[in-house]
Image (cartoon, helix red, strand yellow):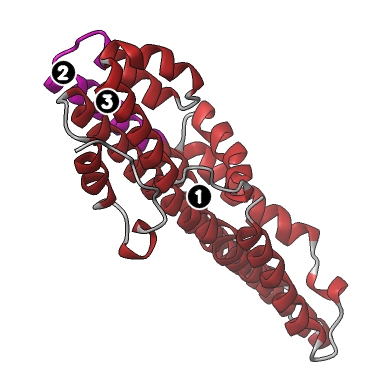
Amino acid sequence: MDIASLLGLILGMVMVVFGIISNGASIPGYIDPASVIITVGGSVAGVLASHKLKDFVGGFKSMALIFKEDVMDAGAVISNIINLANVARKEGLLALEEASGEIEDPFLKKGIMLVVDGTDAELVRGILETELVCLEDRHKKVIGFWEKWAELGPAWGMIGTLIGLVNMLNNMEDAAAIGPAMAVALLTTLYGSMIANWLCIPTASKMKINNDLEVIVKEVMVEGLLSIQAGENPRVIEEKLKSFLSPAVRNDVGDGGGEE
């Protein structure tokens, strides 16, 4: 589990609760079912209207992804590719088919099989890059779900506040009720702001980070496979692929052990 994401959401809620109770207010005073229905229900309805049903359901399910510890380690991928390069250098490209049996990543496995089948290098690049573009498009749909909800949450919060103000102005005879009615009206704005800034924006940001990392790792795979197909020295391949990494993590990649 990704502790940072979970901890961030918990700390955010703790800050809200602290802000409420630090001034002597009570939590129940900040709970209003009608405001919840207007803000949450209205914003969700807006998101539903903005997406196809399949994408809408997939967007909700995607929240679990931000709590999963990322397993795409670029350094480990490079080390794996260097091992494959050594196999190909010593035993030939056909030996990669057997070596691919231990590889779980379907993208890398597909690339290996294309290389083993003797597919032209440009065609290999084209097929893998097309798949990478499609992967990014799928990710953008999910990210767009959360960005749209972040946009509509505060908007529906304002709608709820306006409804509350109208109701309050229609009942001005009781001066003592004006304060509580105003407080209830403002709750929808609070709920809308929390939807955007506590839930949706952090979720979309984390998914963008995960997408960028996955794209880099897949680009490493493409370049590594094409270098293996071209018969390049494993040490040269290693140095080429390390250029995708930040200087701080390049030293963590193991020695490829290629022959000179």
- Per the rendered image, the range of residues in magenta is 115-138
Residue drawn 77% across and 76% down? 17
Q: Horizontal placement of 227 versus 104: left or right?
A: left
Report, in whole angstroms, how far the alpha carbon at label 2 lies from the one at label 3.
Answer: 9 Å
Give me the disc on residue 146.
1
> Residue 3, percent across and down?
66, 59
- Residue highlighted by disc 3: 128
Amino acid type assigned to the residue bearing label 3 in the image: Leu
Residue drawn 77% across and 82% down? 18
Q: Nearer the viewer, mark 1 or mark 2?
A: 2
Residue drawn 71% across and 53% down? 37
Q: Quadrant of residue 222?
A: top left
Identify the element where label 2 is drawn: helix
> Residue 24, percent across and down?
85, 90
Q: Is residue 215 magenta?
A: no
Identify the element where label 1 is drawn: helix
Residue toward you, 247 or 148: 247
- Residue highlighted by disc 2: 123
